[in-house]
Amino acid sequence: MLTLAVQKSGRLTKKTLKLLDECDINLQNGEKAKLKTRADNFDLEILFMRDDDIPEVVYDEIADIGVVGENVFLEKNRDVKIIKKLGFARCRLSIGIPKDQEYNGIQDLDGKKIATSYPEILKSELTRRNINAEIHEVSGSVEIAPGIELADAVFDIVSTGSTLRSNGLKEVETLSRSEAVLIGRKTPLGKDQKTLDELLFRINAVMKASNRKYILLNAPNESIEEICNILPGMKSPTVMPLAEKGWSSIHSVISEDDFWKNIKKLKELGAEGVLTFPIEKMIL
Ligand code: PRT
Ligand code: ZN
């Protein structure tokens, strides 16, 4: 059976379980499962644990695959591989300094003391940029370090920036970015490889569909060609005559971005009764 390690309780948990649900994989006990659970309808076992332990258990072959932030994958530096980027839990890893302090560029960090929970990532990013700074490892509450004179700067995960701001810091440099990734061991999976391939096929179908909508509208026949150019769909749009003469119904697939970019133009072309629906899965 394929074994997947999932964060027990944190920023990755809900979205990982939602992704499995969208792949139509039903877990016994669902979100109430504590340490481990199995899928009812898929050859998959789930182990719940702290995200920091996931690269290690995948390396040790206790789990075959796992979901972690790319930052944890990089920091733990275990001999495991990224199988797929999953597109959620996006964040950046940035340098923050006291907000009143002047900053003219990365060379200002030379000789400074930087507090972080990600010393390995910071070390490699600074080396890559030829900066020599002292790295001070802390396990949590990184942002308070400059305030208590433990460090001159911090290197931490930033999403909205509000944690930095509320600690009197400003974000001055992004050194790395992260999103949730599916990791796996490098050694062969044997017969479980087939299950992983099936899981990846489903994940791809769900991810492709995730920012797309099914769009349906009515249009005067003379606009069909121009509207079809705006809505190319997967192969080409479906065009069906309406009961009312001179009008057709057009069905297609559109990204959320393109929908908002083009809706005014579609209206100008005479489109009426525009409806959009979420798409669950998309296989090209
Ligand atoms: O308990 P366990 O060890 O399993 O969890 P954890 O506390 O180590 O991790 P968790 O659940 O906080 O985050 C899991 C993963 O989510 C991280 O490894 C990142 O890959 C990703 N992620 C995405 C984030 C954030 N966004 C995020 N904003 N992880 C942490 N933060 C924290 C950050 O540390 C800082 O304190 O949020 C604060 C910054 O947020 P803003 O919005 O104020 O800028
Ligand atoms: Zn953690």
Image (tube, grey):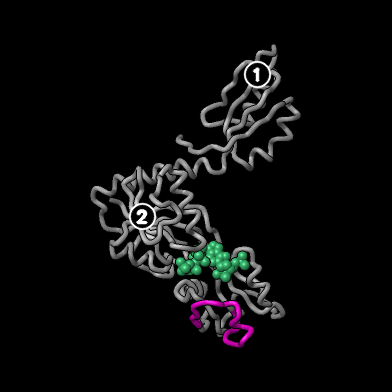
At a point 63% along the width and 21% down the height, the residue shown is 249
Amino acid type for the residue under numbered disc 2: Thr
Amino acid type for the residue under numbered disc 1: Ser
> Residue 156's spot in the image, x, y percent?
55, 72
The answer for how far apart the CA atoms under marks 2 and 1 are is 50 Å
Judge whether residue 36 can be spotted in this image. yes
Query: In the image, is 142 to the left or to the right of 184?
Result: right
Above or below: residue 153 compared with residue 220: below
At a point 53% along the width and 43% down the height, the residue shown is 210
At a point 59% along the width and 20% down the height, the residue shown is 239
Which residue is label 1 attached to?
A: 248
Segment tinted magenta in the rendering: 135-153
Which residue is label 2 attached to?
A: 37
The part of the image, by quadrant, that contains residue 163 is: bottom right
Above or below: residue 146 compared with residue 78: below
Judge whether residue 174 can be spotted in this image. no
Assess whether residue 143 is covered by the magenta stretch.
Answer: yes
Q: Earlier in the sequence, mark 2 or mark 1?
A: 2
